[in-house]
Amino acid sequence: MEISNLILSPNYKILVTGGAGFIGSNLCDTLIANGNKVTCLDNFATGKRENIASLLSNTNFTLIEGDIRKLEDCHKACTGVDYVLHQAALGSVPRSINDPITSNDVNVSGFLNMLVAARDAKVKRFIYAASSSTYGNSKNMPKVEDIIGKPLSPYAITKYVNELYADIFSKTYGLETIGLRYFNVFGRKQDPNGAYAAVIPKFVMQLMQHESPIINGDGSFSRDFTYIDNVVEMNIRSMLTDKIEAVNTVYNVAYGERTDLNELVGLLKQYLSGFDKKIADVKVVYGPTRQGDVPHSLASIEKAKKLLGYDPLYDIKTGLKEAVSWYWNNLK
């Protein structure tokens, strides 16, 4: 991603937890490309070594294979660090429903370990991946940061607890924190395989193999799908801001438009059929609604625009074209 207008000092040392994951590795790529020193902490539970393979020979990149559930690993990773971009987590609502204990251990206990380590290392700022799942059963549309509902899954609870802990650490210890509530992020390096694969890469792989994608429900559920480069931009803006009122708070990270699942599949078929005309004829299958799913999700991004100067470049169509091209060239 080009961030020529968002220059970070090459003297900064930045820790990316979960740096071998989908979002984390994209952050590492961009930060290294712009001359920064980056440490990646990952236990490879969900991250992939191939996501950071191109960085391993770079002298500005350091890999620490460790687990955020171990405080000593967190302390080691935070040593000498200016900024922490905390992406490490166990995502997925269904995963948390099937195994709430492990999700809690990683997302809550691991998060607390990272806060303690960042505090002890006196990092400048701790920026963390929050989640739109925090809005829970709130019927407000679009979602604004200060109005949330009750969580609908163990995963959502863990991400809300992250926000509460970050707020307490800001007030009690003076650690600057910014939470980024991601809305359905997609793009290059997102894993299409496994039981908990996100919907876009999963649909892309099924369509490329001429298999019918299965939509949970009737396809009317909608999401604010957010391309990865918009997310990278928000992380960097969160590091760069020097506005007092812009820190120790949370932001929506989205584009600010929603797309239902029927529209999504239609766009994917359209763009993929440019590579393989047969994909246009693949039928869609409808299944039962998934437990814990929120029917609709749409973000207000006014707060991020006002306080951070956020200006997302990629809408759903532009982002999907980029993502589809990457998947076709890398995974076909």
Image: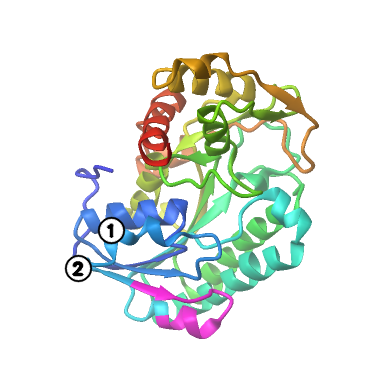
User: How was the colour assigned to the protein in this rendering?
Assistant: rainbow
Coordinates of residue 220 in the picture (x, y in percent): 70, 21
Mark 2: amino acid: Asn
Mark 1: amino acid: Ser
Looking at the image, is mark 2 or mark 1 earlier in the sequence? 2
For the residue labelled by badge 2, is the local secondary structure a helix, a strand or a loop? Answer: loop
Coordinates of residue 224 in the picture (x, y in percent): 55, 32
Coordinates of residue 135 in the picture (x, y in percent): 67, 43
In which image quadrant can residue 290 be found? Answer: top right
Which segment is the magenta one?
A: 63-76
In which image quadrant can residue 121 be found? Answer: bottom left
Image position of 136 (left or right of 40): right
For the residue labelled by badge 1, is the local secondary structure a helix, a strand or a loop? Answer: helix
Q: Which residue is found at the position 69% from the left and 55% from the top?
A: 155
Tell me if I can see residue 14 in this picture.
yes
Image quarter hosting the C terminus: top left
**Disc 2 target residue:** 11
Q: Is residue 167 above or below residue 249?
A: below
Q: Looking at this view, is 285 or 307 the one in front?
A: 285
Q: Is residue 139 above or below residue 78?
A: above
**Disc 1 target residue:** 54
